[in-house]
Structures are given as structure tokens and as C-alpha cells.
């Protein structure tokens, strides 16, 4: 039985880019980097589940002053990230941490950018509901969230195409990594519960991929806090 957590991704790590290219060509990578230039200069970033580090490398090029913490549960993926950046002039800006993101605690308001690409779809809806608020809590008030993930296209032929890709992908990840999901989880449902303001968005690959830049919406944080306080009084 393949392990749901690190081991499946460890086995996949060395071939991840090859499989991706066979299935999607360069489309995923174009999506990953599509809105990087829209992110304002940041001092610190938390990157979750970046896999083999291609987004991390591109992020460093756009944010050369940014101190980045990259967390992934897969030791192999982190090794590939490190090898990729071994000669990078800003390599020292990156700190790597092998950890299950569901156990992240203590990053309260530490970062001004959170990055997740094709990561939120690794979790069940219940997990997203529980952990997404913790991950966003790593952001300072007004911090940015750079999000890239799959979505179900709305219109007829794009929807059919999208379903074929998503079904093939879920089968693949279920087999390789024991992903529990059989279909795309309702990521938007989880995001809509969070105090996020959408700044820019772009659909890619015939609407199969959504790239978004959000900012923490502090008025809602403040009003939530006021509501809590008034309930306590
Ligand atoms: C589908 S891959 C996406 C990789 C990369 N972000 C990309 O754009 O292709 C998911 C990544 O998240 C990591 N991951 C999955 N579940 C995780 C967890 N619970 N905690 C930390 N990393 C996790 C995997 O090891 C893998 O590197």
C-alpha cells in the first residue's frame, strides 16, 4: 500500500516533471508563474508543497529580496528543490522545512506572502476547512496569497475536457500517493470562508486552472474580532 503522506511523493519526485510534461506540456508551468509579476515586493514568504521547486525558482527571480520558507512533507521533493537552487545567487534566502503542513503551528502573522500551487487539491474538504485558516494565519494583516490550482470549467466542451483531465489526474495521484479524493474538492468553498480579497485572477488552459492573487481582508478580521468580543461581553 502506498503511503498517503510523504512516501508516495518521494517516489514520484524524480519523475514529477516528466509526468507533468507528458500530460500537460508546459501549461501547468505557465499557469504557476502567470501572475508572479503582479505580486508586490515582499520581505518574507511561506511556500507550501512546492514539489520540485520550479515555482520557488521563479519566485526568487521575481522577489530577490524575499526570505522564503519552503515547507513540503516529502524529503525527496525538498532535495530536488535544493539541488535546483544550488547555484542560485539568492539560494541563501530560502529555508527548507520537511513537515506535514497540517501540523504547522506558530507562524502567526509572520509572512507577507503565502504561496500554494496545486497544493490545496491534495486535501479533503474537511481538511481544507480546518487547515486553510491556519495557513492563512501565517500572513500578516494585508498579506498576499498567491494561489494556483485546478478548477472545473463552466462551459460545455471545456467542461468535458476538464473532467477528462481531472479524472485522469485523480486516478494517477490516488495510485501514486493514496490521495483520498476521487474528484476535485470544493476549494472555492473553503476559500470563500476566509477573509480574502481577490486582487487579480486569470484562467488558464481552457479554464482548467485558476491563478489568483488575494490579499488578507482585514476589515473582516476586525469585524470578526468585534463580533467575538461583543459575544464575550
Ligand atoms: C501535487 S504536488 C504540487 C507540487 C508543486 N506545487 C507544483 O506546482 O506542481 C503536491 C506537493 O505538496 C506536497 N504535499 C502534499 N501533502 C502535503 C502535506 N500534508 N504537507 C506538506 N506537503 C504536502 C507534496 O509532497 C508535493 O510536493
Image: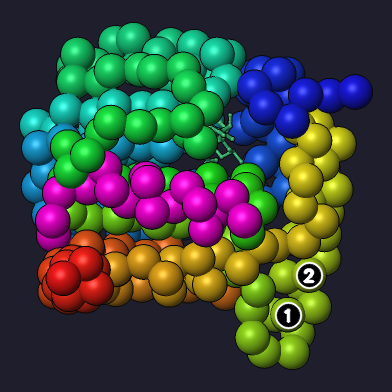
Which contiguous range is marked in magenta? 126-142
Q: Answer whether residue 157 is magenta in the image.
A: no
Q: Relative to 26, is 48 above or below?
A: above
The residue carrying mark 2 is 163
- Image x and y of residue 78, in percent: 48, 17
Q: Relative to 184, is 11 above or below?
A: above
Residue sitting at the far front: 233
Q: On the image, which quarter does residue 48 sit in?
A: top left
Residue at 58 percent across and 14 percent down: it is: 76
- The numbered dot on residue 190 is none
Label 2: which secondary element: helix
The residue carrying mark 1 is 159
Residue at 53 percent across and 45 percent down: it is: 119
Give the left or right position of residue 75, taking residue 145 as reference: right
Disc 2: CA contacts within 10 A as few (<14), some (14-19) or many (>=20) = some
Give the left or right position of residue 77, taking residue 132 as reference: right
Q: Say whether marks 1 and 2 touch (CB < 8 Å).
A: yes
Amino acid at each position: 500500500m502506498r503511503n498517503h503522506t510523504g512516501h508516495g511523493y518521494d517516489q514520484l519526485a524524480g519523475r514529477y516533471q516528466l509526468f507533468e510534461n507528458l500530460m500537460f506540456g508546459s501549461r501547468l508551468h505557465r499557469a504557476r508563474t502567470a501572475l508572479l509579476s503582479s505580486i508586490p515586493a515582499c520581505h518574507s514568504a511561506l511556500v507550501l508543497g512546492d514539489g520540485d521547486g520550479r515555482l520557488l525558482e521563479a519566485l526568487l527571480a521575481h522577489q530577490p529580496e524575499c526570505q522564503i520558507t519552503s515547507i513540503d512533507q516529502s524529503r525527496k521533493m525538498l532535495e530536488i528543490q535544493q539541488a535546483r537552487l544550488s547555484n542560485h545567487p539568492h539560494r541563501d534566502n530560502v529555508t527548507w522545512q520537511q513537515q506535514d503542513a497540517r501540523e504547522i503551528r506558530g507562524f502567526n502573522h509572520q509572512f507577507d506572502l503565502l504561496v500554494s500551487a496545486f497544493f490545496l487539491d491534495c486535501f479533503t474538504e474537511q481538511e481544507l476547512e480546518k487547515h486553510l485558516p491556519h495557513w492563512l494565519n501565517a500572513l500578516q494583516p494585508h498579506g498576499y496569497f498567491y494561489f494556483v490550482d485546478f478548477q472545473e470549467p463552466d462551459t460545455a466542451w471545456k467542461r468535458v475536457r476538464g473532467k477528462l483531465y481531472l479524472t485522469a489526474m485523480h486516478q494517477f495521484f490516488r495510485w501514486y500517493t493514496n490521495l483520498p479524493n476521487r474528484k476535485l474538492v470544493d476549494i472555492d468553498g473553503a476559500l470563500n470562508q476566509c477573509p480574502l480579497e481577490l486582487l487579480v485572477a486569470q484562467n488558464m488552459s481552457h479554464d482548467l486552472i485558476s491563478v489568483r492573487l488575494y490579499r488578507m481582508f482585514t476589515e473582516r478580521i476586525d469585524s470578526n474580532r468585534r463580533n467575538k468580543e461583543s459575544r464575550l461581553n
